[in-house]
Image (cartoon, rainbow, N blue to C red):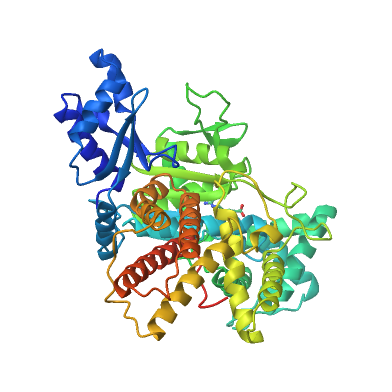
Amino acid sequence: MQKILDLISEEMKKAFEAAGYSADLGKVTLSNRPDLCEYQCNGAMAGAKQYHKAPIMIANEVAEKLQNSEVFAEVSAVAPGFLNLKVKEQFVREYLQAMREDAKFGLQMPEKAKKIMVDYGGPNVAKPLHVGHLRSAIIGESIKRICRYAGHEVIGDIHLGDWGLQMGLIITELQKRQPDLVYFDENFAGEYPEEAPFTISELEEIYPTASAKSKEDAQYKAEAMEATFKLQSGVRGYRALWDHIMSVSVADLKKNYANLNVDFDLWKGESDVQDIIPGMVEDMKKGGYAHESDGALVVDVKEETDTKEVPPCMILKSDGASLYNTTDLATIMDRMESYNPDKLIYLTDKRQELYFVQVFRCARKTGLVKPETELVHIGFGTMNGKDGKPFKTREGGVMRLEMLLKEINEEMYRKIIENKSMSEEEAKETSKIVALSAVKYGDLSNQASKDYIFDIDRFTSFEGDTGPYILYTIVRIKSILNKYKEQGGNLEQSALKDAVNASEKSLMLEISKFNAMMEAAYEEIAPHRICAYIYDLANAFNRFYHETKILTEEDKEKQAGWIALLALTRDILETCIDLLGFSAPERM
Ligand code: ARG
């Protein structure tokens, strides 16, 4: 479906033409004086120079041509030459009617779907998830859903950090604690046990202990590096331990991400591309792209137009070891070969911005991607505490994701049980759903690149620009619709009516912006656009609700029209929150 602003502009363009002016002047925008009009056109101002005529004269002539317009109810030419516009109730109603009948509420599908891969989450196996990983998961999940809704084929990949020194550290610590484990017996040739020699909670304790030790004890660190090397060169017992670490951690990660309503199509990791690194490096050398520099192998990626220094992309360290870069490049190669995507989107902390500039340039230069392949890095800001510093626990440690969610769940539970006569069980379930909206909306309503303050009090409030406020609005609508049904009303048979009052028309106009907003959210890869839209929509709905006695309305046809409008509002709000990655409860 065409966007409503385009339809309105078309009508205006015809009028400009009919009055003898260039159609280009007829561009209509939203009004910046909502107290005076709904839309405006400043074309007469722009045309004044071109036609050597006073703008108000042009405006008057154009307004004249719109006397019997099907679109405009009111066209007023005001000094010095603006056109203030109000649209017809019927025009808006018909537009909403068409939206209601369209599976995507009027969002135009692309002629050719793109294949898009989203690399997000990026947790490091065996290290606990912390709040830094929260943003990647929340924003990435929403972006994945937005691209999919916009009609593209989207693959989400978690890109596990599963191949680093952390694995060697864990193995080393394990060996210290249980030297007799069969995995460390070089002469063992049998089958290794199926059961891991540790639980997830032990694993979560082992890594920080080992990491702390390695920082104080050089010998310990050397052992861990040796263990990492042995693992990477395929020593059987070490590989078997790695498999255990992976299965125990991944099961735990799956549980954590499920709690966040985040789900990945691929659970690939850094380890998956290690075998293709030597071939890739060889090609980079043969192609003349990689050269030696201080013993290391690098690819130059600086460009003449750079205003800041972009250092070479390091492919191999002087000891021949590969790096984070190397793995990312090999992953790009693997993704191109296995999936051939048109676009790759990466979500990480914005401190990795320069890093991705290097990697992307290197991938292009060495021909790992096609010239037309889009490579996009979305760098997000830091989630800060109320003191403006990165979010910490009360004790000042790094806040673990689970703890953070627990805290917000408890706060939500307190609020919900306080003002409702709900069973404890329902209140617990409901708090989880609402708490997730608080966390996600609190994050996504900001432009991703900005830092923001994680403020539990504000995020969990039922008022203001918050997730719970949006859910509260949806629940309110659902409750009216349910009561309507209980009174014998039929939702399916209700048809939209022309608006009868100002707040109803405002609500309808808010709804009509959906496809334009979605198009922008997709093109700008910007979930915050959806938040801004549903906040305005929820406000418009609540104003309408407070002014209108829906359930006691005597005129049944009028009532049915409102009910249809409510159902459409609910459907759109629920679609939008699904794109943000949360849902609404039945009551709250
Ligand atoms: N594991 C990394 C970290 O914790 C994030 C990975 C991001 N994705 C990527 N392809 N580099 O910082």
- What x and y, as percent, mark residue 79? 37, 24
235 or 351, nearer to the observer? 351
Circle count: 0
Side of 138 where 339 appears, left or right = left
In the displayed structure, 101 sits above or below 27; it is: below
- What x and y, as percent, mark residue 66? 20, 37
Q: Residue furthest front?
A: 554
In the displayed structure, 347 sits above or below 105; it is: above
- What x and y, as percent, mark residue 276? 45, 54
In the displayed structure, 208 sits above or below 336; it is: below
14 or 426, nearer to the observer? 14
In the displayed structure, 400 sits above or below 475; it is: above
Side of 353 where 365 appears, left or right = left
Is residue 109 shown to the viewer in this render? no
- What x and y, as percent, mark residue 573? 44, 63
Side of 384 where 347 appears, left or right = left
The image quadrant of residue 16 is top left
The image quadrant of residue 369 is top left
Is residue 223 shown to the viewer in this render? yes
The image quadrant of residue 434 is bottom right
The residue that appears at 73% across and 54% down in the rendered structure is: 391
On-image quarter of the C terminus: bottom right
Q: Residue furthest top?
A: 52
The residue that appears at 53% across and 67% down in the rendered structure is: 471
570 or 338, nearer to the observer? 570
Side of 352 where 216 appears, left or right = right
The residue that appears at 51% across and 24% down in the rendered structure is: 306
